[in-house]
Amino acid sequence: MTNLSQFPDRISNAETSRAGCRTVELLIAPGVSLVTLGSVLEPLRMANRIAERYLYDVRIVTESNAPVEDANRIAIAPTHVTGLETASPDLALLCVDVDIHPRVGERVRAWLSRLARHGTSIGAIGTGAFTLARFGLLDGYRCAVHWELAPLFQEIHPGLELSNVIFEIDRNRMTAAGGTAPIDMILHWIAGHHGRALALAASEALVHDSTRLSDETRARGRQALISHSSQSISRAVQIMEGHIEDPLPIKQLAELVGLSPRQLERVFRLHTEKTPSQFYREIRLHRARKLIHHSGLSIREISIATGFSTPSGFSKNYRQRFRQTPTRERLSQRSGA
C-alpha cells in the first residue's frame, strides 16, 4: 500500500523543470462537473508527486480564455490563456457534462481539427464524445459514453462504433463515460508511459485501489440493480432496451427468456413491483425524455422512435408519467424553466 507520507506535498525546487514532460490541456465547457474534472486532474497530479518531478504539465483552457461556471455555478478560471490557435499539447481533452450540445464553437472545432491532422491524442470525458462525433473526430474510432446516454448517442450517430466499456482508448482517441471513469482512463494512459507500478501507486494514493480495466463493461443502471435477483429479468431488460422503436409483445419476450408470460409477470412483480408491460413502458418513456432534452427530433419523430403508435397515445402516457406533455416539457427545457 502506498504511504503518502513518503511523497512531498510539492515538487522540490530542484525538480521544477517541466522540460521533456507531456502537456495535457483540458478544455472545459460551461456546466462541467468537478467530479469528472478532478478525475482527470488528480491521477496526473499524483503521478507527478510520486515521481517527484513533472511528468505531466496540466493546463486548463477555455474557448474564450475567460472563467466558466461548473455544474454548481462555481467559476473555474483557465490556467493558460495563450489561445487555442497556438496550443499544441500531447493530449487535448474536452471536458463536458450533461449537455450534449455544449457552448463550444468554431475555435474549438478548428483547434481540435488541427491537432487531429498532426496526430495529437484527442479525447473527451462526460458528454464530450457527442461534440467530437459532431466534429467528425470519432469517425473510424471506437468510443465510450455514459451508459444512460448510449442509446441517444447511437440514435444521433448510428455510423459510429460505441463500446460497452467505461473508457475507450483507440489509437489517438480517448473517451470516458464520465463520473469517476476518467480516473481509470488516465491511470491506463500513465501506465503506458511510465509503467504499471507508477499507475498502481497513484491509484492507491487516491484510495482507488480497485482500478478497472479498459474492457470492463459499464454498470447498467436498473439492470445492475436487479441482475443479482433474477437473471431472467436482467435478460428481459436487455431485450427491452434493444427493442425500443419496435416493442416486442410480452408473450414473445417471455419466450426469449425461457419463461411463460405468467411466470415472467410473477418474477417482475416480485423484483420490481411492476408488470413487464409497465416496466417496458417506463424504459421507453425515459428514452423519450432524453430525446426531448438532448435531440432536435420532433415530438412525432420521438413518439415513433420510442415505439408509440400515435403522438396522442405518446402524449397521454408521457403526461401520466412525468406530469406534463412532451411539448410542454420541451418548451420548459428551452426556456430554462
Image (cartoon, helix red, strand yellow):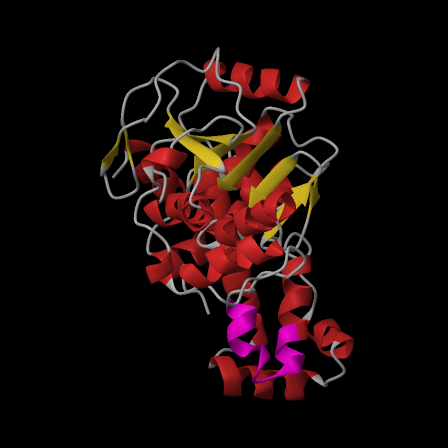
Q: Residue furthest front?
A: 14
Residue found 50% across the figure and 49% down from its top:
182
Magenta residue check for 227 = yes
Of the 4 image quadrants, the one containing the C terminus is top left
Q: Residue furthest left?
A: 74
- Quadrant of residue 322 in the image? bottom left
Residue 223 to residue 22: above or below: below
List x then y, in percent, for residue 140: 75, 33
Residue found 23% across the figure and 38% down from its top:
73
Camera-nearest residue between 80 and 169: 80
Q: Residue furthest top?
A: 85
**Residue numbers of the magenta segment:** 222-234
* Residue 104 in the figure: left or right of residue 197: left
Camera-nearest residue between 290 and 4: 4
List x then y, in percent, for residue 57: 44, 32
List x then y, in percent, for residue 92: 52, 29
Residue found 38% across the figure and 14% down from its top:
82
List x then y, in percent, for residue 229: 56, 85
Residue found 68% across the figure and 73% down from its top:
235
* Residue 231 in the figure: left or right of residue 326: right
Predominant secondary structure, magenta span: helix
Camera-nearest residue between 295 and 154: 154
Camera-nearest residue between 17 and 69: 17
* Residue 251 in the figure: left or right of residue 333: right
